[in-house]
Image: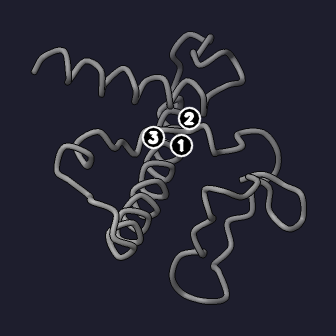
Amino acid sequence: MIGAQLNVTEARHRLARKIFFGQRGEPRQHYREGMEDQLGALGLALNCVVLFNGLYIDAAVKQLAADGFPVTDELLARLSPLQYDHINFLGRYAFTRPTAPGLRQLRSPHTDDEDDDGEQD
């Protein structure tokens, strides 16, 4: 159990380093007043990624179950919201409320990873 917890903790740190890419995932300055804001923003971004992944993992699992795929407890135990290969960490970000409530439509696993406008998520 200790090894499993260490794996989860390291996955969380790996995601945080990926989000905080400017200095290779490490704060390079000595601590000074107000630095908590920078670390708080990193925690907020990390939590946003985990929430986004959790919502879409849940939707994907429900879709698989509705399509007749055998979703077992062993399979669910291997899912993690700490994955980030599908997230573009470089570029501009728009934090706007979507026009329609709910999640975007899930992509087919048999299609290309690019959106209609040629950008990746």
User: x and y percent of residue 57 in the render?
Assistant: 41, 58
Say what secondary structure mark 2 lies in. helix
Q: Are marks 1 and 3 in contact (CB under 8 Å)?
A: yes
Q: Using the numbered discs, state the Cα–Cα distance from disc 2 to disc 3 in whole angstroms.
A: 9 Å
Q: Is residue 5 left or right of residue 55?
A: left
According to the image, label 1 marks what residue?
41
Q: Nearer the viewer, residue 15 or 26?
A: 15
**Which amino acid lies under the numbered mark 1 shown in the image of this protein?**
Ala
**Which amino acid lies under the numbered mark 2 shown in the image of this protein?**
Gln
According to the image, label 3 marks what residue?
43
Q: Using the numbered discs, state the Cα–Cα distance from disc 2 to disc 1 in whole angstroms.
A: 5 Å
Q: Residue furthest left?
A: 1
Q: Residue at x 45, y 40 (%)?
A: 43
Mark 2 crowd level (few <14, some 14–19, many ≥20, 10 Å Cα): few
Say what secondary structure mark 1 lies in. helix
Q: Residue at x 40, y 45 (%)?
A: 81
Note whether 121 is above or below 108 in the view shown: above
**Which amino acid lies under the numbered mark 3 shown in the image of this protein?**
Gly
Q: Is residue 115 left or right of residue 25?
A: right
Image quarter in which the N terminus is found: top left
Q: Are marks 2 and 1 in contact (CB under 8 Å)?
A: yes
User: x and y percent of residue 104 in the render?
Assistant: 60, 74
Q: Residue at x 46, y 53 (%)?
A: 53
Q: Nearer the viewer, residue 88 or 59?
A: 59
Q: Is residue 2 left or right of residue 63?
A: left
Note whether 63 is above or below 121 in the view shown: below
Mark 2 or mark 3, earlier in chain: 2
Q: Residue at x 49, y 58 (%)?
A: 52
According to the image, label 2 marks what residue?
38
Q: Nearer the viewer, residue 2 or 60?
A: 60
